[in-house]
Image (cartoon, rainbow, N blue to C red):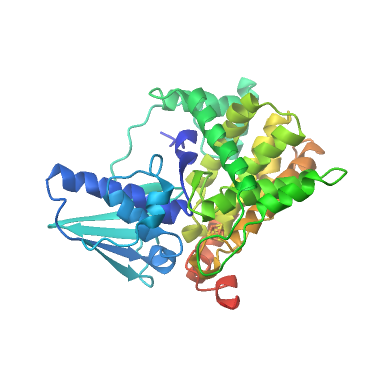
């Protein structure tokens, strides 16, 4: 059976600054806490070992706070971001960092030990967590199974459906327990709220880099200018989300936190500058983005620790391009073309966050990728959808490039800008 990647798993409401280093570890810690509670062992000392990328950039990405919050029983969806930020130590919890140990299953590995109980967890990107227990999740058969973009297009043509319609039919079958439309509306509302909060908040982001927030001042300046300012506004929307993320506030993982600005910003641009309705954005836009995101998650990776920034920002850029093309009325082949163009020009993008914070280059990188997504749609809409390099080819190329990339460039802050920007 082809694995369906659910939109409700790809887009989850959580907190910043990182899906793999904050959201995933909090989920793992909460799961370990549940296990200790079930056996009445919660008062015993706990030892947490963070391997690979988690060990290298865990401090800047808020991993310790997230784990302490998870061990208290908090969850990313419902926790108080302020409380998580304030959690710095717990005398009962010892942390061990092993940045140079890369376990074969995934670079983002965590070991929890307490009272004779030992569990390994892997934060595999986008807030998804796996354990050594390889039991597959119960899965419902979907009406339109596909593995590749080519198969997805064949279904669209055979059934005379859009990519959004195929995605929604599969999602509703896969998640019979959830009201998919209502949940997508809730996700869109959280994205919009996050942009608007970021456009109103000034100040300095956490961490010794002392990065000033810019979204609010850019947005204010744009309101006084004449002429088309839609591209500048789009950049401000993306920066707003990523500043909220860097501050550890409420954001939607889309499909990761480092790349969380692109999909909401392009949607907000469509709302404010292309007259697309909120209903269409919540449903058609988000389900198309998730359908394309599922191809990346299944056939390559959305994890910076596995594929570099091309896996995070590149995937989000491609998902946003596909989604915008869809709500602007593109054919399935034009949607696939937009997704392909957007990723093609992100191939090879490394992950090198300065100081291990999800700020430099992450925040601006989202602004530029949002513009790339819109540019990709413009190019695709001026064509017929016929093109030489397929989306499947760029996804496979991204996977291979990620596999060949040195670990220095995979969320370890051991190469690139992270070692060339002088700390002051
Ligand atoms: S550089 Fe890219 S992949 Fe790395 S933390 Fe920043 S946004 Fe994520």
Q: In this view of the protein, can residue 395 be seen by the observer?
A: no
Q: Is residue 216 left or right of residue 80?
A: right
Q: Is residue 339 left or right of residue 88?
A: right
Ligand 1 located in image quadrant: bottom right
- Count of numbered circles on the image: 0
Image location of residue 87, percent across then percent down: 35, 57
Q: Residue at x 73, y 44 (%)?
A: 374
Determine whether 280 is above or below 222 in the image: above
Q: Residue at x 65, y 43 (%)?
A: 265
| Quadrant occupied by the C terminus | bottom right
Image location of residue 302, percent across then percent down: 51, 51
Q: Is residue 144 left or right of residue 48?
A: right
Q: Residue at x 51, y 61 (%)?
A: 206
**Of residues 208 and 309, the one drawn nearer to the viewer in this rendering:** 208
Kindly give the residue lying farthest to the right in the view shown.
Answer: 227
Q: In this view of the protein, can residue 218 be seen by the observer?
A: yes
Determine whether 281 is above or below 129 in the image: above
**Of residues 210 and 31, the one drawn nearer to the viewer in this rendering:** 210
**Of residues 326 and 39, the one drawn nearer to the viewer in this rendering:** 39
Q: Is residue 321 left or right of residue 105?
A: right
Image location of residue 197, percent across then percent down: 59, 43
| Quadrant occupied by the N terminus | top left
Query: Which corner quadrant of the image does residue 202 belong to?
Result: bottom right
Image location of residue 407, percent across then percent down: 48, 69
């Amino acid at each position: 059976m082809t694995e369906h990647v659910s939109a409700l798993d790809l887009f989850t409401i959580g907190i910043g600054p990182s899906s793999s280093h904050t959201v995933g570890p909090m989920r793992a810690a909460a799961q370990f806490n549940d296990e200790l509670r079930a056996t009445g062992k919660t008062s015993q000392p706990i030892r947490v070992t963070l391997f690979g990328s988690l060990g290298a950039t865990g401090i800047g990405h808020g991993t310790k706070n997230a784990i302490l919050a998870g061990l208290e029983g908090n969850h990313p969806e419902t926790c108080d971001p302020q409380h998580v930020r304030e959690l710095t130590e717990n005398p009962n919890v010892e942390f061990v960092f092993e940045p140079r140990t890369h376990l074969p299953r995934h670079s983002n590995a965590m070991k929890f030990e307490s009272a004779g109980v030992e569990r390994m967890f892997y934060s595999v990107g986008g807030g998804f967590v796996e354990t050594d227990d390889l039991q597959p999740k119960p899965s419902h058969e979907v009406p339109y199974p596909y593995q590749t973009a080519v198969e997805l297009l064949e279904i669209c043509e055979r059934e005379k459906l859009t990519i959004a319609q195929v995605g929604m039919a599969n999602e509703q079958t896969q998640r019979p327990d959830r009201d998919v439309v209502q949940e997508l509306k809730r996700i869109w509302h959280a994205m919009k709220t996050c942009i608007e909060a970021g456009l109103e908040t000034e100040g300095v982001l956490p961490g010794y880099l002392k990065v000033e927030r810019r979204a609010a001042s850019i947005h204010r300046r744009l309101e006084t200018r004449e002429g088309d300012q839609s591209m500048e506004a789009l950049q401000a929307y993306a920066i707003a989300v990523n500043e909220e993320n860097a501050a550890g506030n409420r954001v939607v993982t889309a499909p990761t936190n480092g790349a969380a600005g692109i999909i909401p910003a392009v949607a907000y641009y469509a709302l404010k500058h292309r007259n697309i309705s909120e209903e269409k954005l919540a449903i058609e836009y988000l389900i198309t983005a998730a359908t394309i995101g599922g191809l990346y998650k299944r056939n390559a990776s959305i994890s910076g620790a596995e594929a570099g920034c091309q896996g995070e920002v590149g995937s989000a850029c491609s998902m946003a391009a596909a989604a915008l093309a869809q709500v602007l009325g593109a054919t399935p082949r034009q949607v696939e073309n937009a997704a392909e163009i957007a990723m093609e020009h992100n191939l090879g993008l490394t992950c090198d966050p300065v100081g291990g914070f999800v700020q430099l280059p992450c925040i601006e990188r989202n602004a530029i990728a949002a513009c790339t997504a819109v540019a990709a749609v413009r190019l695709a809409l001026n064509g017929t959808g016929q093109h030489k390099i397929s989306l499947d080819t760029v996804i496979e190329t991204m996977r291979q490039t990620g596999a060949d990339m040195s670990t220095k460039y995979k969320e370890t802050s051991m190469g690139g800008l992270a070692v060339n920007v002088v700390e002051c």
